């Protein structure tokens, strides 16, 4: 790895806020997809490869409204059909967000600082032409190509430039750990049960001592904490194949009839939004692709094997 590319405070409008059965922020697959799309253009012109990506959130605004309890997405109304009826449409969740991205750059950047400046200018030209999580990039405060931090002071300087913000870390290892603890008490517990313990808000009635229960007594309810502390969130982390691989053109109505086709389903994991001041190494926050014969997964440095993810 020769360099680190910092996209500081990217403002994105109408990004996709729905990821599988979760919502509230784009899936990590969107950000690695953006990295891959950018890498294809940079590799063709600069002979460089972009791989890992770290995501820092500064602000977000989901397009939704609430009556005080339930939330509903603010949707656009399509024009009426020729019969005067409301046209059918797929519900979409959109959001505005301001994020910073740290992307690993592999390869040699020729001509030292002049080469870094040339790469920066090239990125300023092509980034507005791409989409991030389906949204439009309307502004990037700054793009910087810099050497990878090697000392604590250099890391602190990078963190200072990104504050205030929260970075997304992979905590899928905690999911596997919690699943093993559930199996100790219930051999039929599944990864879905463990995943829901991280995703759901749960309450439990306190059981009074025997003999103290009277008819009509109100129960004392208490909140059940999540398996681990921190701002833990469920998130989609990739796709897994659920069918055989069909030959190109073998499936009707496929988007691309020149590429082999397979049916897939989403893979889910657990992430943590963590304050930047808690990061001790950039390796903790980078997400990278991990591919197998049955799918591809977005994983952090401490992630378990892809086959252990919830799907």
Image (cartoon, grey):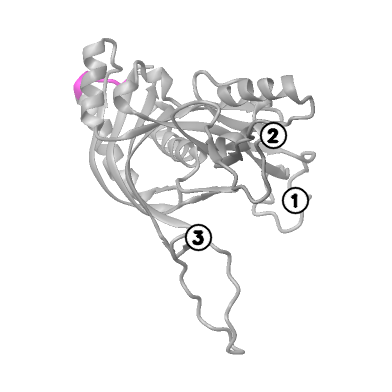
The Cα atoms of the two marked residues, 2 and 3, are separated by: 40 Å
Which residue, given by chain and number where applicable, does mark 3 sit on? 70
* Figure quadrant of residue 145: top left
Check disc 2 and report its element: helix, strand or loop.
loop
Check disc 3 and report its element: helix, strand or loop.
loop
The Cα atoms of the two marked residues, 1 and 3, are separated by: 44 Å
Q: Which residues are magenta?
A: 109-113
Percent x, y of residue 153: 21, 13
Residue positioned 33% across, 29% down in the render: 275
Check disc 1 and report its element: helix, strand or loop.
loop
Confirm whether residue 115 shows in the render.
no
Residue 155 within the magenta-colored segment of the rendering: no
Label disc, if present, on residue 211 of the rendered structure: 2
Q: Nearer the viewer, residue 72 or 141?
A: 72
Residue positioned 37% across, 19% down in the render: 282
Left or right of residue 30: residue 247: right
Q: Nearer the viewer, mark 2 or mark 3?
A: 2
Percent x, y of residue 182: 69, 25
Which residue, given by chain and number where applicable, does mark 1 sit on? 249
The Cα atoms of the two marked residues, 2 and 1, are separated by: 71 Å
Percent x, y of residue 199: 56, 39
């Amino acid at each position: 790895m020769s360099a680190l590319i910092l996209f500081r405070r990217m403002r994105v409008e109408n990004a996709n806020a729905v990821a599988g059965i979760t919502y509230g922020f784009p899936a990590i697959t969107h950000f690695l997809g953006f990295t891959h799309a950018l890498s294809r253009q940079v590799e063709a012109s600069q002979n460089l490869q972009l791989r890992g990506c770290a995501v820092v959130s500064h602000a977000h605004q989901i397009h939704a409204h609430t009556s005080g309890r339930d939330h509903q997405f603010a949707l656009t109304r399509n024009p009426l059909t020729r019969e005067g009826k409301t046209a059918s449409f797929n519900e979409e969740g959109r959001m505005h967000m301001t994020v910073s991205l740290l992307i690993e750059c592999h390869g040699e950047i020729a001509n030292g600082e002049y080469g870094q400046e040339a790469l920066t200018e090239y990125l300023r030209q092509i980034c507005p032409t791409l989409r991030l999580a389906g949204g439009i990039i309307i502004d990037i405060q700054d793009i910087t190509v810099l050497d990878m931090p090697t000392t604590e002071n250099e890391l602190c300087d990078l963190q200072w430039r990104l504050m205030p913000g929260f970075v997304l870390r992979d905590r899928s290892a905690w999911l596997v750990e919690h699943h093993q603890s559930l199996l100790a008490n219930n051999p039929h517990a599944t990864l879905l049960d463990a995943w829901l313990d991280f995703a759901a808000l749960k309450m439990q009635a306190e059981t009074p001592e025997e003999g103290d229960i009277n008819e009509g007594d109100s129960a004392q309810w208490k909140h059940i904490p999540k398996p681990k502390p921190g701002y833990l969130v469920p998130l989609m982390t990739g796709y897994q194949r659920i069918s055989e691989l069909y030959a190109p053109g073998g499936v009707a109505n496929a988007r691309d009839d020149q590429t082999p086709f397979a049916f897939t389903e989403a893979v889910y994991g657990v992430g943590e939004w963590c304050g930047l001041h808690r990061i001790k190494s950039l390796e903790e926050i980078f997400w990278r692709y991990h591919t197998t014969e049955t799918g591809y997964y977005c994983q952090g440095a401490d992630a378990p094997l892809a086959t252990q993810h919830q799907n």
